[in-house]
Image (tube, rainbow, N blue to C red):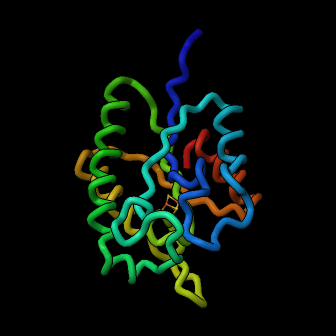
């Protein structure tokens, strides 16, 4: 059987909601099924990136939800930078081996993994999470272009459309 060359890098919590901050798990108890089903239906290899908030010394299991500003002062950039370097190198290795990294899937409103929208308490603003910023920087240094997609489980239709775009170019 031929192996599929298609790869997706996804935020850790899409396969393990247990790493999320307290009070944020509302729609999926463990995995985000739409993302996994999409990969199964289209023979896409899933690469689960480590969770920056979980690994950050100020984060970890059972942490309270915090904003980007708080994490900026409490070590998330350093943790994110380390993870981003490793993940970018991994992507380079895969592409050099002839595999295709279709996209990186982050999670909107996360202070680490948002790709377009951040939650500022009472308002939603445009902005990227700290980990996504670091990963973009590393990919630029490595001269590798990979599209970013930010998902939100509440936007069901949009999620389906975004996943479809992964296959047909963003
Ligand atoms: S930091 Fe990223 S991987 Fe970790 S829980 Fe938040 S969105 Fe998910």
Q: Tell me which corner region of the image, top left, top right, bottom left or bottom right, holds residue 38.
A: top right
The residue sitting at 71% across, 59% down in the picture is 158
Drawn side of residue 159 relative to residue 50, left or right: right
The residue sitting at 33% across, 38% down in the picture is 90
Drawn side of residue 138 relative to residue 50, left or right: left
Front-most of 143 and 136?
136
- Give the vertical position of 25 relative to 71 (above or below): above
- Give the vertical position of 136 relative to 112 (above or below): above
- The answer to whether residue 51 of the structure is visible from this angle is yes
Q: Position of residue 61 (x, y in %)?
A: 49, 64
The quadrant of the picture occupied by the N terminus is top right
Front-most of 116 and 63?
63
The residue sitting at 36% across, 64% down in the picture is 56
Q: Which residue is farthest left? A: 141
Q: Tell me which corner region of the image, top left, top right, bottom left or bottom right, holds residue 29.
A: bottom right
Q: Position of residue 18 (x, y in %)?
A: 59, 57
Front-most of 116 and 32?
32
- Give the vertical position of 45 relative to 127 (above or below): above
């Amino acid at each position: 059987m031929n192996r599929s060359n298609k790869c997706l890098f996804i935020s850790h919590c899409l396969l393990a909601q247990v790493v999320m901050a307290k009070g944020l798990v509302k729609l999926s108890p463990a995995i985000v099924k739409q993302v996994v089903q999409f990969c199964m239906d289209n023979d896409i290899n899933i690469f689960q990136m480590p969770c920056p908030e979980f690994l950050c010394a100020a984060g970890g299991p059972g942490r309270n939800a915090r904003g980007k500003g708080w994490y900026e002062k409490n070590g998330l950039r350093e943790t994110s930078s380390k993870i981003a370097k490793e993940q970018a190198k991994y992507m380079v290795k895969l592409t050099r081996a002839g595999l295709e990294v279709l996209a990186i899937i982050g999670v909107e409103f996360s202070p680490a993994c948002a790709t377009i929208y951040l939650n500022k308490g009472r308002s939603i603003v445009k902005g990227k999470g700290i980990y996504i910023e670091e990963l973009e920087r590393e990919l630029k240094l490595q001269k590798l272009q990979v599209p970013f997609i930010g998902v939100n489980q509440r936007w069901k239709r949009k999620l389906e459309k975004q996943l479809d775009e992964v296959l047909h170019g963003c």
